[in-house]
Amino acid sequence: MIISVHQPAYIPWLGYFDKIIRSDTFVYLDTVQYEKNSFINRNRIKTPQGVTWLTVPVKTKGHLNATLLETEIDKCQNWREKHLRSIYLNYKKAPYFHLLYPKIEMLFKKDSFLLAEMCYEHLVFWLSELGVEKKIIRTSQLAVNSKKSNLILDLCKDLDANCYLSGKLGENYLNEEKFHNSGIKIRYQEYRHPVYPQLWGDFIPNLGVLDFVMNTDKYELIMQ
C-alpha cells in the first residue's frame, strides 16, 4: 500500500492533489505545529496584475507553539467575504465560473474556527470537484506521536504501508536507512506541472487549484 502525507493547505496547488491521486491512502497531517508564512493558511490566485495571495488570518499571539488542531482562525476579520470578492472579480470571465462559484459560496458559509478543520472541509470539497476518491486519514485519529522522519516512518508502520510517496523536500530529512530496514520503500514525487488555459496573459504555474478548476475540466492533466 502506498501512502502520502501532507500538512493541511488552503486552496492547495496541483502537486498536492497529484500526491493524493498516486497514493492508496492520504494522511492529513493535522497534529504538527503551525508554520507562519507557509501554504497552510494561504495560497495564490491570478489577477490582471499578476498573482495575489488569499490569506486566512489566524490567531498567533500566545499560540506560536500550537498545533494545527489548536490554531484558531481570527473571526474578527472579514476574510471570507474578501476572498469571495477576489474570486468573483478575477474569475467571473473564466469558462467554469458559473458552475463553480455558487458551490464556493456555500463552502465559505461554513463557519469553522479551527484552521485544520476549515482546511479539511475545503480539501474534501476540491477532491469532490476533481472527482478524486481516496481514503483520507487524519493523524489526530491515530496514536502516533513521533517527530519529523520518525513520524512518517511510524505512520507507515501503523497503516501497514510498504511504500511512502514523499515530496522532493523529503530527501533533506528522511532517514532512508530506517525505512529500508523496516521494509518500506520511499518514492519521491517528480511532478510536472501541466500548462492549461488561463485568463490574464502568460501562463503562471503553481497557483492554487481554484485557478485550474475555473479554467478547465480536463482533470486528467493533474497527473502528467
Image (spheres, rainbow, N blue to C red):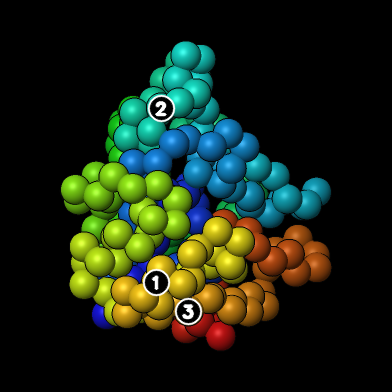
Task: Indicate the amino acid at tag 1.
Answer: Phe
Could you tell which of marks 2 and 1 lies nearer the N-terminus?
2
Image check: 165 left or right of 117?
Answer: right
| Residue at image location 45% in from the left, 51% down from the top | 148
Q: Which mark is residue 179?
A: 1
Q: Secondary structure at mark 2?
A: loop
Q: Is residue 45 above or below residue 166?
A: above
User: Decide: marks 1, 3 in contact (CB < 8 A)?
Assistant: no
The residues tagged by marks 2 and 3 sit, at their Cα atoms, a distance apart of 31 Å
Task: Indicate the amino acid at tag 2.
Answer: Ala
- How many numbered badges does the structure rendering display? 3
Instruction: For label 3, count other residues whose C-alpha is less than 10 Å away and answer few (under 14), some (14-19) or many (20+).
Output: some
Q: Name the residue that disc number 3 marks.
A: 187
Q: Secondary structure at mark 3?
A: strand
Q: Name the residue that disc number 2 marks.
A: 66
The residues tagged by marks 2 and 1 sit, at their Cα atoms, a distance apart of 29 Å
| Residue at image location 70% in from the left, 45% down from the top | 52
Foreground mark, 1 or 3?
A: 1
Image check: 182 left or right of 177?
Answer: left
| Residue at image location 46% in from the left, 72% down from the top | 177
